[in-house]
Amino acid sequence: MRVVLAAALAVALSSALPAAQTSGSAVPEKFTAFAVDINSTRGRAATSVVDITINRWSPEADRDRLLKVLQDKGQDGLLSDLQKLPVVGYMNTPGSLRYDIHFARERPEPEGGHTIFLMTDRRIPAWEAINRPRRFDYPFTLIQLKVDKDGNGVGKASVATKITQTKDGTIELEDFNNVPVMLNEVKKVK
């Protein structure tokens, strides 16, 4: 299923954005959100608090390189290059280890808030790496946060995503799950 995050990825990787539009907020920026995953295998929605820290924004050079690699080498090349980028932030849930984020971009919104796009490789459990089920072909985690000028907002997370590009250059995302994880009550931590 194609997800709404495709537009965010296109914006985050688009070379048409002027440099000034992607580095307006001071870093580090820290957010907390209430995640709701209705794709849970336990028969009911899984919920958790998620903490996200962005220590620096990814430069245009990283964005341009990732877009070129996606065009030339596809998803596997994109994954390899993304994993080589320096860590720009991290996320974690209570009782879990932090998970590094390798790409972070933002776009100011006219009303004073901004949209934040985060991309990283997906944590692959040992069982999955050995057995390589269908989910193994969905190696990316993508997060989009929309926050207002006060730092409050909502977001979406696609935890297991496949990224492809069509012949006409359109970036497409396929989420392994039917619905992305909803990030409610996003709040900037001061």
Image: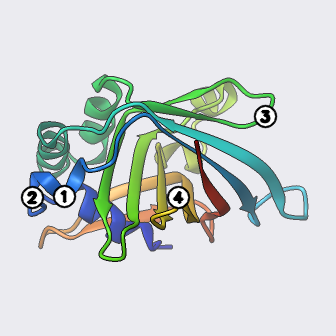
What separation in Å lies between label 4 and label 1 (alpha carbons)? 18 Å
User: Residue 136: x, y in percent?
Assistant: 53, 42
Left or right of 136, for residue 50 = right
* Residue at the extreme right of the image, as rendered: 43
* Nearer to us: label 4 or label 1: 4
Q: Nearer the viewer, residue 169 or 86?
A: 86
Q: Earlier in the sequence, mark 3 or mark 4?
A: 3
Q: Give the residue at mark 2.
A: 18
Specify few, some or many for label 3: CA neighbours under 10 Å numbering under 14, 14-19, or 20 or more: few
Residues at discs 3 and 4 in contact (Cβ within 8 Å):
no
Q: Amino acid at mark 1?
A: Gln
Q: Give the residue at mark 4.
A: 151
Identify which residue is drawn at 63% across, 34% down: 128
Q: Give the residue at mark 3.
A: 94
What separation in Å lies between label 3 and label 2 (alpha carbons)? 37 Å
Q: Secondary structure at mark 3?
A: loop
Q: Secondary structure at mark 1?
A: helix
Q: Amino acid at mark 3?
A: Pro
Q: Earlier in the sequence, mark 4 or mark 1?
A: 1
